[in-house]
Amino acid sequence: MSEVAAHTRLTPWPRSRPAGLLIVERNAMVYRRSWMILLSGFFEPLFYLTFFVYPLGDFIGGVTLGDETLEYAAFVGPALLAASAMNGAFYDATNVFWKLRYGKVYDAMLSTPISPGDVAVGETMWAVVRSLLYSAAFLNILLVLGLIESWWGLLILPACFVIGFGFAGAGIAAVTWMRNWQDFDLVQLVMLPMFLFATTFFPLSVYPEAIEWLVQALPLYHGIELIRALATGDVSAFQLVNVAYLGLMGIVGMKIASRRIDGLLLK
Amino acid sequence: MTTQDGQPLIHARGLVKRFGELVAVDAIDFDLQRGEAFGFLGPNGAGKTSTMRMIGCVSPVSEGTLRVFDLDPAEDGVEIRARLGVVPQEDSLDLELTVRENIIVYGRYFGLARSVLKQRADELLDFVELTERAKDRVEPLSGGMKRRLTIARSLVNEPEVLLLDEPTTGLDPQARHVVWDRLYRLKRQGVTLLLTTHYMDEAEQLCDRLVVMDKGKIVAEGSPRELIERYSTREVVELRFADDDGRPEDFSEWTDGLVSRVEPLPDRVLLYTDDGDAASHGLHERGLVPESILVRRSTLEDVFLHLTGRSLIE
């Protein structure tokens, strides 16, 4: 070993690229060894369709939306895609819990030029990337099964990005409030009913008006509306509301997470 | 000690860290000059780690002045951290990556190019003698290896100051000597070192200058030799007694005129004198017969005992 001391400055400063990307890069290095997990994101919705949605469709026939009647699988398929984008992003984001509470990874990062805001942005983007991989796999299944009926379908993957972003941001924020593994049960208490009630399996019109309002406030409802509209081609200006809702949720979530990580780790 | 430009790398005046009611660091003053090895010596809870964290810009200053590279940690934390190397008390290695990847990823956090880092990682692993473990996971490494990897990692950005918080705590004696050897080489290469320790031998071996900390305050400052000259005698006579019956309640009648100071501890009695052999001879003539007598040189442990009335490791 010759010299390890500083003679010339080697660290370029200020940095040229957003530091959040460096966290995505770190996670990708770890993930290279566990890409098999991706298959679970592919098979789970496939099992749903094969063993639940198609048999149920035989039983109840089609779903009437406005003046159009849809095959049941074409109604539920896009909703399952939205839910898969949500779950992929949200649960990947909550994996941060381990790093935040038990691992020392962030302590090391924060002693470098990485800041809490970079951590929040980086982990959010990483959760979105993983969620997009699940979504792309699932979208392929829907295409093969002929459940995407419109050219608007080309926008489904970008829409999955928006859903992933919204729920990744929410997940990153939520995880900073969790104190132990029991708190994950509380999260499940919100996520599972939302999955069941956000018009995944039946249209909004089955609910009484008061409940309709409640359902329309759910973030997953906006994700499902977005994907379903693009899949069926029944697109309206309401889809801009869907995008705005989810985008805002992601941004606010990252902001909260950034402040919380700062408070938790930089004491 | 002065540097070319005379500006200290780190400058603290009246620096305070509070956690609610607790005052962890209580108005300390110090300056770190380029090229020196400077130490904070004190027991656990003295406020050493809190001070290091404030310098590392991962803990906000509660009160007082702190300048690092003449920058303000509250405003320029990112730039300061880009120029520091940090070896934390608890290893914070990335357990999901290999030994070599740990260095590369850490270097990426500084925005260094992957091509530069690949070469740099090999050099650093060579420096800390971990080349053979480059492709291994971190978890199975021994404590000493993990610490060496943490040191290698902290050098990846060619830091202007290396912060080491208790660099050898928890290591076995052999592993400690390997770490000391590496740190000593860094020091010879001109790397500025700032370290905390509660091992007096570590402070004596590595530090050109140190401050003794106790309960958040700096109680003394100087080179190890200066501190020993100022607060202790040249030699120490350690007396041990077989049981409490053989141990006198009051030592003054035995030691008056023989030694300059007596420090009774639960397990032994320390007599401070410039001539240990003469003192033990004198005791023998006066008829005091302890189980064992040991004459040794004064250490920083004695300095700390004199200043605080307690020992460093409790």
Image (spheres, grey):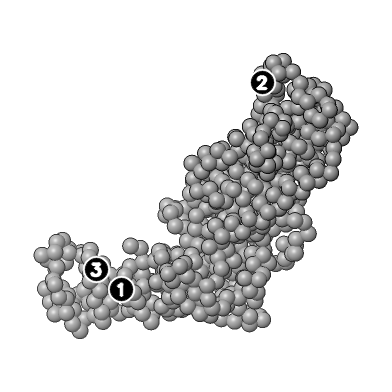
Q: Residue at x 84, y 40 (%)?
A: A236
For the residue pair B284 and A177, the one nearer the viewer reads as A177
Q: How crowded is mark 1: few (under 14 residues within 10 Å), some or many (20 or more)?
A: few
Distance between mark 2 and mark 3 Cα atoms: 78 Å
Position of residue B237 measured from the top left corner of the image (x, y, whole percent): 26, 72
Res. A235 image quadrant: top right
Position of residue B162 measured from the top left corner of the image (x, y, whole percent): 58, 65
Image quarter hosting the N terminus of chain A: bottom right
Q: Residue furthest toward the bottom?
A: B257
Q: Which residue is drawn at 16% across and 76% down?
A: B251
Mark 3–mark 1 CB contact (< 8 Å): no
Mark 2–mark 3 CB contact (< 8 Å): no
Distance between mark 2 and mark 1 Cα atoms: 76 Å
Image depth: mark 3 or mark 1 in front: 1
* Residue at the disc numbered 2: A52
* Residue at the disc numbered 3: B265
* Residue at the disc numbered 1: B309
Q: Do labels 2 and 1 share a chain?
A: no
Identify the subunit bearing mark 3: B
Q: Residue at x 14, y 80 (%)?
A: B253
